[in-house]
Amino acid sequence: MYKETGEISGLSGRMQTAIEPQDFSGLQARRQALDVYWQQGVSGYALLRKHSDFIDHHLADSFARSSPPGEGFALVALGGYGRQELYPFSDIDLMLLYDPARKDELKSLVEAILYPLWDTGLEVGHAVRTLEECMADASEDFFFRVAMLDARLIAGSAPLFAKLTEKYKTVYIEGKRQEFLDDMLEQRLKRETQYGRHTYLLEPHIKEGCGGFRDIQSMVWTAHVVFGLQDLASLQEAGLLSLEEFKRFEQAQDYLIRIRNRLHYVSGRKNDQLFFEHQEEMAQAFGFTNAKDMLAVEHFMREVYGHMQTISVTTDLFFEHVEEVLGSDDAPMAGKTLEPGIEVRHNKIHLANTERIRSEPKLFMRLFYQSSRIGKSLHFRTRKAITANLQRVDDKLRHSRRNAKLFLSILVAPEPFRVLEEMLDTGFLTTYIPELAKVESLAQHDVYHVFTVDRHLVQTINELEKLKEDESNTYAVVSSPHILFLAGLLHDVGKGFGHGHADRGADLARQVGERMGLTTNELGILDFLVRNHLFLSHTAQRRDLEDEDLIMRCARQVNTPEKLAMLYLLTIADARATGPTVWNDWKAALLLELYLKLALLLDRKDLSAQEQERSAELGAQWIREKVSELLPQGAKTNFDLFSDDYLLSFPPEVIVQHINYAKKLDKEDVLFLHEQSRDSWSLLVITRDRSGLLARIFGVLALHNLNVLAAKIFTWGDGTAVDTIEVSSAISETYDWQDWEAMESELHLAIKQRLGLEHRLSRKLAPLRNRPQGVQQRLAAKVAIDNEASEIYSIIEVFSEDRIGILYDITKALSDFGISIYRARIGSKADQVVDVFYVLDNDGKKIEDPSFIKELQEGLLYAVSKQ
Amino acid sequence: MKKIEAIIKPFKLDDVKEALNGIGIKGMTISEVKGYGRQKGHKEIYRGAEYIVDFIPKAKLEIIVEAAQVDEVIETIRQAALTGKIGDGKIFVLPVEEVIRVRTGEKGKEAI
């Protein structure tokens, strides 16, 4: 193996002087020649040129020695050799052009040229053609047609060669610009399908892959044919590339050349794919060393990806430009203005005036927002303008709430992937969220991660979007999808600093979220998701899922069904976005098992009874202290009145409110308060507890068209009933229009048993009773009575369909049986009601007599199925 | 020479590998396999949605050892993979006729 710089063996005496091809005896010395050049420190483009010169010299030599006199023959280099870009193991594409009149002399000349070449062990692509044959072949073969663009005369008849190039130009270039472009684009598309659309695959192909040499050549060829430009520099002069773009592009090209040179040697053959097993050696050769945070190879690959990305983006922009130039015979269409400064024209989104983005930085996000909203890409000139003005993306913009809102809405809108890719390619994403710059083009040297970190993050968003449909049941649980998607975009933001990327990522994500103005609650969820994004998959694969303690601990860590759903979706998206080997139905099955176990546990409210008891005692004590602090000094409050359960159900301030209201009970029999909260209305009823109280309250609510969403029913030790009820209007009445006064007075009457609830409700509900009974309506009602779960109370669970007045019927039935309700939890989901009552019979005992249990069940079933 | 195939619970894989390393077994082939035996696949209903997994994920280890070492390897795997619950897995022992190392052409004991 050679070294790019370093000691020399053998030819050391001559190393300081320039060595010419003629210093070597014949083509067989090619390998030796290359070694010497390297030892002299010749690398990159210069080496390709030297190599090409070397071959030129010796081929010209062979030609001169055996060529018959006259103008009958020309030795022509094609393709990469034609461009004088010869890598150590590149094919040598040769063509011997001849005058058909001299056909007899051909054989000996061909032998004289080709035999020594074969001895070098190089792959030689050779053809012998007349001018006519050339033209015929070119008409059929796209690759030959393109190779001809780089044709170069090595030896022989210049007039013959000139005739060929002239003819080629008239037939295949002049007036054929559109056809050429179409062919070129078709080939590009084919390559994309074969080698992948992306520059950042695990083992990039630096010749055919996206952002590889073919992209560079396609651009140069097209510039040649379409604009008559010969090289990169003239592209810049013609204004097709900005100076900045040109410099970056040239740098990228040079880097790739050096890689390819080295790669051929490392592999010992013509190999243009940066295979996994070569990457470490290549990294060393390029002078990278392992650091604490990042491996040499990861550093190296990051550079590779970065440069290929430059080439890919630049050539994409170039081809869009050319397409537009050639397609411009369409009548110039007036743009349709989407908003001031932004318009849509020819299916692309344009900045109406590229200068405007300098003075109005909010346009950056507005452009992407419009792109997301109407599902069209940004025009290349607009993308260039974004990249050129990124320094205008300042802290003010990064802290703008309005800007953040747009960004978050892009994440949850359709096609977030397309828009985020454009954000990434233009450099906007990493400028807007600088935390992401650290993971830009960052490679992970293992066989799992197919993408660089930044691409993986964007890919995760893509997968999350697919899960909206694939896992629609789980997705339906998520009430703040924008946080889920933001977590998807940021979950690996802590990578590139060694171990602990999830914790570091969570801190960074929180920083981003704070800047975007998320609420404390949202920040908490974001932090949780990023910090735990590996938790489910690790647990599913490495822990015994039949260990109930483990499942319990996990459930406690995840805490709510919604957070579990979000984490589950993120886990799947992350795995799918990592690479083809990471996600399969085997892993899916393990993850699903864990998910369902946790979900079922979290849905049960009695999560870890023991644990709850312990923390409940502490919690209740804390609340007692808080409440005493909040009460006016000297106020006498007997805390024995309040059960732990009650204390834990409200914040201290609310309990203080209850205590203060309850004092008025001396003067009034019933206290009724109502207020509007976010999604519902909250009612508070305080009165002396009495038999059938709850039924009367629910009856009045039904009379006033109110649906009960949830209720907390408590009775203090002194017999004060404190009932808080969340309701919503069944007839979509607004809060202000609801007749609260009438309701309050009826509540008073009902509680004092001066209101005929039974007949009033019956009359009110009559019109509803005749509705046809669909199949879906007959969900079997169920009543369960549980004496195990609670030490003190019997627990009655009633499942049934929801309808107006059902709670009145249930509680009325309970009251008729003389049963006292001490606590109740009312929950309705869709059309179903699940109501839980903690009760005792009229002797203050649990309901344990089997025949009474049966009677009670039947009574309740009758009550809920009453028409 | 024998080939030992062990089907175990996935989460026990690390324990088993470690235990085998402890008795000098360094090389093995590991794969993710899907099983269907006494421990059936299952259907769960959660929030109205049906989730069906019609196989049980398992890990498979394949190890080639000399006949004399078979009992030790079996016992090591068994102990490390044991949870005592249904689905702990199975171990199979098969005769092996010949082992050849591709790189060197070595055969038999040397090639293991």
Image: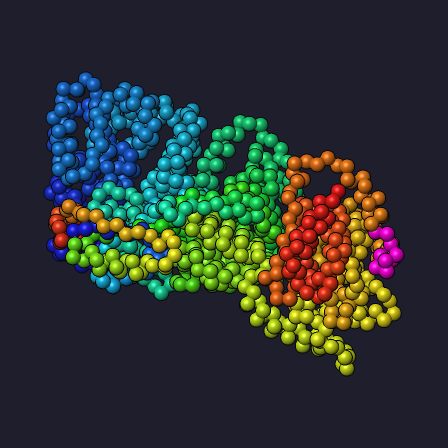
Residue sitting at x 29%, y 47%: A275
Residue sitting at x 47%, y 60%: A548
Residue sitting at x 85%, y 48%: A760
Residue A394, quarter of picture: bottom right
Q: Is residue A603 left or right of residue A228?
A: right
Residue A31, quarter of picture: top left
Report x, y in % for residue B43: 48, 45
Residue sitting at x 23%, y 37%: A91
Q: Is residue A13 left or right of residue A524?
A: left
Q: Which residues are magenta?
A: A749-757
Q: Is residue A303 left or right of residue A715?
A: left
Viewer-proximal residue among A4 and A297: A297
Viewer-proximal residue among A235 and A220: A220
Answer yes or no: is residue A186 visible. Answer: yes
Report x, y in % for residue A60: 17, 35
Q: Is residue A763 above or below residue A145?
A: below
Answer yes or no: is residue A385 visible. Answer: no
Report x, y in % for residue A619: 62, 71
Work out which quarter of the rendered image holds the C terminus of chain A and state it: top right
